Image: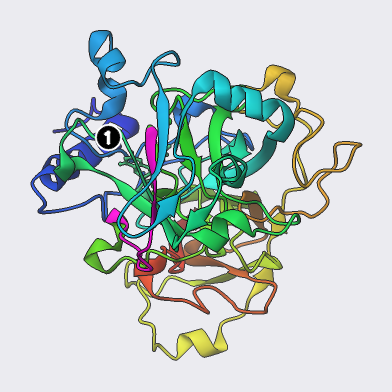
Amino acid sequence: MSEPLSRRDAFRLGVGVLVAGSATGRVTANDPKPPADTPSRSFLTPAKDFEDVSRGNPIPHTLHGEALVNARLTPETWRLDVAAEDKAKIEKPLTLDLSALHKLGEKHAVRFLKAMQCNNIARPLGQGLWEGVPLRVVLQACGKLIDVRRLFYWGFHNDDPKQMFRSSLALNQVLDAPPGELPPFLAYKLNGAPISLERGGPVRMLVPWAHGFKSVKWLQKVALTNRYDANDTYAEQNNDPESYLKTAAYFDSTKEEMYAAGKPVVVRGTAMVGWPGLERVEYWLRADASTGGKLAEDDPAWATAEWHPGVIDPPPKDWGGGLPDGVLPKDVWGFTAAGQPKEWPLTYSVAHWTVTLKNLTPGKYELRVRTVDKNGFAQPEPRPGQRSGKNLLQCKLFSVTS
Ligand SMILES: Nc1nc2c(c(=O)[nH]1)N[C@H]1C(S)=C(S)[C@@H](COP(=O)(O)O)O[C@H]1N2
Ligand SMILES: [Mo]
């Protein structure tokens, strides 16, 4: 297929093909083709502009009319069942509807910023202002929990067990997150509006520290279990089901570029701020070595590379993403009463960075950008394994013409 296909379509198609396979248990959403060109620069991503990673045949967000009602994916029909399985016991199993969740939200709702990133796709999928009720608030209403060690949860899956998209959390991760940390949420708003069907509404799980696969869309079931092992769908194919988000930098576009001499070369991108935080972004520029930007892990050139600081954008005045006038509501988690973030960049969000290169002589170049986390590890350390999140250094080739 050629030209008329947009980037979004092409991406969807890639995922779709994999999805069809996953229903037969052959392949999963691993390694879909990364999106190629430049996303918008607004800090928050409008809900419809997130890159979509959705399994199912049909994909639940393509349902409409009666099928949607039967799937209980309308605001009126949505229900969440919380119950125990196997040896685990729960004093008061419950079924929650959306108005009951909103009611809990009047007292317990939290608004917070978080980027969605797939374990198997480098560039973050989008960044949102999410709103939800901590899952621990709902569990408090369940009375005594006996022999519960873990929670398994899943969403609507076309009533076909093979299409189930499961994830899991340890009980302490749900109940004990200290007040200074974001706990797992039952989320029902994105950028101030109800979560769209495409983004997993009416209600999706939102696990702030984790890659996207923990944030199950079209959530309908939370099962408390005596099991201690993760039975996440994403534990298949050697993915690490307990990985926290990594700190890593990504180019907005890795497309090869041409610039005219005499003007500064401005290259931009995003950095995921993972669990260890982000200390700085830095770049290494060198003459093109004619290897198509490839540089082996053990190449001696790494040892003599000269790294220079890039610039991280300050908090924006206009947060974008479809918020009214681009303005954040007052009570966002991690912000002061005056509306300023207490730390910057924010953990579990993306920061935007810029590298400006001046006075380059005509020729072809390789540019690499990496993060250094707050423990002093330079990307892709300390966890270069790609099955726990994509964080290999990217290379951008460009030339300066005379
Ligand atoms: N029910 C369900 N939830 C799901 C998925 C899915 O296929 N089905 N995909 C997961 C994965 S792998 C990712 S990366 C994120 C993507 O979220 P997004 O489509 O809102 O960007 O959703 C997660 N939640
Ligand atoms: Mo994913």
Number of callouts: 1
* Residue nearest the observer in this picture, 399 or 344: 344
Q: Which residues are magenta?
A: 219-233
Residue 211 position in % (x across, y down)? 46, 54
* Residue nearest the observer in this picture, 251 or 63: 63
Residue at 63% x, 76% y: name it. 307
- Secondary structure of the residue carrying numbered label 1: helix
Q: Quadrant of residue 388?
A: bottom left
Residue at 24% x, 30% y: name it. 59
Write down which quadrant ligand 1 falls in: top left
Q: Is residue 157 left or right of residue 142?
A: left
Quadrant where the N terminus sits is top left
Residue 366 position in % (x across, y down)? 47, 67
Q: Is residue 60 above or below residue 31?
A: above
Residue furthest right in the image: 338
Q: Quadrant of residue 173?
A: bottom right
Mark 1 residue crowding within 10 angstroms, few (<14) / some (14–19) / many (20+) = some
Residue at 59% x, 77% y: name it. 378
Q: Is residue 144 visible?
A: yes
Query: Disc 1 residue type?
Result: Arg
Q: Which residue position is annotated with label 1?
A: 12
204 drawn magenta: no
Residue 61 position in % (x across, y down)? 31, 25
Q: How has the structure been colored for display?
A: rainbow
Residue at 70% x, 17% y: name it. 324
Q: Quadrant of residue 234?
A: bottom left
Q: Is residue 172 above or below residue 78?
A: below
Residue 185 position in % (x across, y down)? 56, 42
Q: Is residue 262 visible?
A: no
228 drawn magenta: yes
Q: Is residue 292 above or below residue 257?
A: below
* Residue nearest the observer in this picture, 105 or 216: 105
